[in-house]
Amino acid sequence: MENNLITPEPIAIGEDERESYENWGFADTAFAVNERGNVTILGTRYELSGKELPRLLPWIREVLNVNVDTSDVFKSSYPTAVPAPVRNEDFLDHITKTITADRISFDDEIRLRHGHGHTQEEMFAIKYGRIGRIPDFVVYPISEDEVAELVTAADANNVVLIPFGGGTNVTDALRCREDESRMVVSVDMRRMNRIRWIDKENMMACIEAGAVGRHIMQGLARYGVTMGHEPDSVEFSTLGGWIATNASGMKKNKYGNIEDIVLDVTVVGSEGKLERRKPSPRESTGIDLRRLLFGSEGTLGIVTSAIVKLFPLPEVQEYGSVIFPNYESGFAFMRDLVRESTPPASCRLVDNLQFQFGQALKPASESSLDALKGKAQKFFVTKVKGFDPYKMVALTLVFEGTRHEVDGQKRDVYRIAKRHGGMKAGSENGRRGYQLTYSIAYIRDFLMNYHIIAESFETSCSWSDALPICVNVKKRLLDEYAKRGLPGRPFVTSRITQLYKTGVAIYFYFGFYFKGVDDPSHVYLELENIAREEILANGGSLSHHHGVGKIREQYLPEIMSEAMLKWKGDVKRALDPNNIFGVGNQKLGRGC
Amino acid sequence: MENNLITPEPIAIGEDERESYENWGFADTAFAVNERGNVTILGTRYELSGKELPRLLPWIREVLNVNVDTSDVFKSSYPTAVPAPVRNEDFLDHITKTITADRISFDDEIRLRHGHGHTQEEMFAIKYGRIGRIPDFVVYPISEDEVAELVTAADANNVVLIPFGGGTNVTDALRCREDESRMVVSVDMRRMNRIRWIDKENMMACIEAGAVGRHIMQGLARYGVTMGHEPDSVEFSTLGGWIATNASGMKKNKYGNIEDIVLDVTVVGSEGKLERRKPSPRESTGIDLRRLLFGSEGTLGIVTSAIVKLFPLPEVQEYGSVIFPNYESGFAFMRDLVRESTPPASCRLVDNLQFQFGQALKPASESSLDALKGKAQKFFVTKVKGFDPYKMVALTLVFEGTRHEVDGQKRDVYRIAKRHGGMKAGSENGRRGYQLTYSIAYIRDFLMNYHIIAESFETSCSWSDALPICVNVKKRLLDEYAKRGLPGRPFVTSRITQLYKTGVAIYFYFGFYFKGVDDPSHVYLELENIAREEILANGGSLSHHHGVGKIREQYLPEIMSEAMLKWKGDVKRALDPNNIFGVGNQKLGRGC
């Protein structure tokens, strides 16, 4: 094998790739209100960048039933004050012997950024409240040996290590427990970001855990290959983070989820470097402890590299979209698609409210012809075809593969869609839907400026539980919202994002206007928890791909038996007796 | 979900399903030599049953270069003497309160059968030697609660429990360690063999761990579904055994291996019943301890049931075969097939010697027309097409799926095969190849009667390591055999049995004539170990699907780092502190 290996150049990170500390994403991009009072997206990075979105604010006002006033800004006081760092001098003496000063930091703002992910609570806290305990120190190792050195020093000196990847989790997984009195060190893995080798003969690559999704994609594409893993956070999240959270990619129908793509994992645990001599396509060599790393959320060790499967870049990539009269018909289509065919790489069904949201995000038409075309289309769909604009839903599709494969999938999709009253809505609408994935992530921070709090949560469930979950979660949230006398109406919407033989993944967005509401972030969390209880009561899982972290650990006893929970604790104590991987997720830790 | 559940009738096991204790398989089937001195297969169960195989003995004599004399029988002294049972009266008092007398046994022959699987060493030992320590007692629980009761009683009284499924493993996984002084109880799971429910809406079934493969297939087929898992031992092995050994099915290209098919596992561990509230198509709910059960080989607990995925019975099942001029061209075909298409459900490439073996297993032609046809075919292939009968190889194929899928796969297979010099050899030859899978398993015990010892072993590896492994293992075995001055020539042959994106699984058969050889079983093991070292040195895995058990545990330090081995031990000690699951596989145990 060794003879066929390509050794790519290290990844060079451009000046224009700077990330914001205060908000989601790249520093050059944000939603803003322009001089005409319309929403616009700053920068040039995305397709919507520089565009004006005149329909967005009117639509938000209509949906929330609140006259959102853009002159009334909820002013951020980012960065929130942070506690002075706890210092363990023996640990510092030890590690500064090998790790140079340019790769360690006590800086407050850097420490703050390493103490949170992207839950609304965390983002609210860094801007409007207090995040509490944060890491005392940030270190950027550049090799497996340095990570091993950090682990040895931490174990010897009773210091806590928290691996840090893209910082994009939505589970409070990076938040420190308040009662952690030991020194807490955030181990930022992003300088271990090399693609070490690519083996095109056997379609594998070895990649360091700190490599960021967009760089992995670019680095592999240069050699005509891909690992095919594209979570919505792929611009920022890392390979190590994907493993730690058991991530799912939007194109999993073609490439699999992270556990399907990763062949081998190297990890530094409290007992040393856990590694294998050679990856294997598949094997039976006893209890496979590597599998424990998936979903381990930093509690068992630090993933340093992984060997992943590769796929050729697809010969063909095409988008598609279909509109259905209602959610039920779109859902019935999906079930038949899974039963009768191989679904395309990605296949998402948005409900009517999310469909409307997509329409509201359309930029001001550049020409009057476009505007006319849009009106004519709308007339055809609603008047001629009889689709109810307040019921119709949209399916977006990505096809990837050989010409032959894609043609076959398209044939099947449109044939089955027709049977369920679906109408082809063009590849351009499909493409737009997927392009939105990245730019839309910036809207949460924008809305917060105008007293709107919003967030997503997700689940997975069997086919027969899916529609009741969508209906009951929405109903429950509307009821609870009304019961509390909160302002206007909340925004609650669902989409089916992943298809499996036995069921689906469902993604919810929930948001509301909070001006005049006491502690809105807490109210949100309370409502999110009620939604989670509704999901569990209706047979949904605790999480499809976001994970448990600290935000959902309270529900673990509801999904597994006491003996199973005890096993979890036993394994943690056995593998990390001093709890140095003390991030404290999944209620396994005994500290931060 | 609960509304759609089908509850199948319990499985009724027929009188004709009795299994042999002394030999592989059903009691009604065996290879034998008839009055004309030809091999024949007794019984009526298989396609070859009742047939005469006149070419087999001549071919064996030619290949082994030994004049095998069928009047010179190596007489079995089965059953070997067994030690008197160790009795733990407190344990017995405890369990006989709930488990009735008809479901417990101290019988010597039953205990003996529960103390081994199907390695040549074990089978040789029960017939010609001593197996040593065996279970003291066999119990047949009928419910999860009874299993829990057994575990509680064992933990309280320091008794060892060894779960028993089909007893077909080839890793010495059921063999007791000689130094185990505690009472050893074999927990035969085969009375927990119900399909508890079938959910066709969500394509899942809940099946008890002791259900045997053939019954699962029959029971599900009645409702138009399958779990698609068909290891070569499917007639006898159980769902629990598949999970414990991380089994692979011959049709995994379509249905996946056992870890892909099982959605959820319930297991009784030393801390109680480990179970989940509800299965999920896929989730991220933290460290997934269920995954530890795959390949656990009885060391962590007793699997009592699992929820598995279902697939519709295929609309179309077709066989196919292709002959290639040589192994290299057949292999190159396979690699291109994986790169360019979706391989059919099963796809196996046998080398020339195994191809010859297949020819030698052809029954006496029933008509002179058949014989003429056979000769004409042979003439066409070797004279017209120029295939060398001592180099040519055969590929056998099973296609399963919709008409459209199967047609597409056939088109791709034959198109790519042609590019590599392949020639279609008909569906009948393909069908025969797969039919042989089950009947051929009986030949080992037949050959042993005539001083021939034979066995299989397997590995998985990357595409680029595969051909060197095939070549070097054969060469090494021939060299070592000659070096030892053993009789005649050994039989050593390989086939590629599974295809993955990154590599393949390779299956070897190795056998030799041992008359006059001291301790032939030990000589065999020594040579098998040398082959394993050659495999490891050439980049192969320790095992693709057979597992580790006791036969390969010595190699664990060669495939993983010390820290990883220590993790394995730590996990075992944490989850089973008293080592009641003391079967002692994977060098994790501290006793039997």
Image (tube, coloured by chain):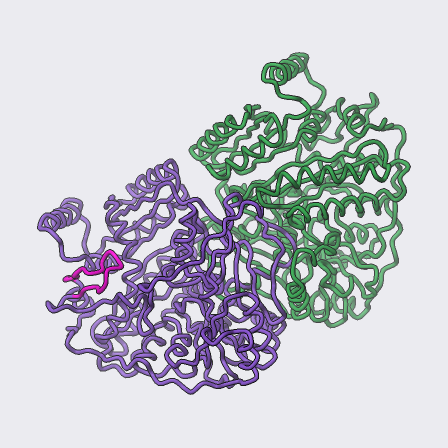
Chain colours: A green, B purple
The image quadrant of residue B84 is: bottom left
Image position of A164 (left or right of B440)? right
Q: In the picture shown, does residue A332 fall above or below A465?
A: above
Question: Horizontal placement of B457 versus B186: left or right?
Answer: left
Please indicate whether residue B339 sits to the left or right of residue B266 in the image: left
Residue in the image at 55% along x and 59% along y: B265
**Residue B472, quarter of the rendered image:** bottom left
Q: Is residue A347 above or below residue A373?
A: below
| Residue B293 picture location, percent across and down | 54, 63
User: What are the residue bounds of the magenta stretch?
Assistant: B39-55
Task: Residue at 79%, 70% (x, y): give it.
Answer: A90
- In the image, B267: left or right of B84? right
Q: How many marks?
A: 0
> Where is residue B378 drawn, in percent x and y?
15, 49
Residue nearest the observer in this picture, A165 or B591: B591
Q: Is residue B50 magenta?
A: yes
Picture coordinates of residue B561, whole percent (x, y): 55, 69
Q: Is residue B86 above or below residue B353?
A: below
The rendered magenta stretch, by its main secondary structure, is classed as: loop
Measured as percent of width and height from the top left, residue A278 is found at 49, 61
Residue most extreme to the left: B368
The answer to whether one can see residue A219 in this image is: no
What residue lies at 58% left-to-right and 77% top-to-bottom? B153
Q: Is residue B304 visible?
A: yes
| Residue A146, magenta (yes or no) | no
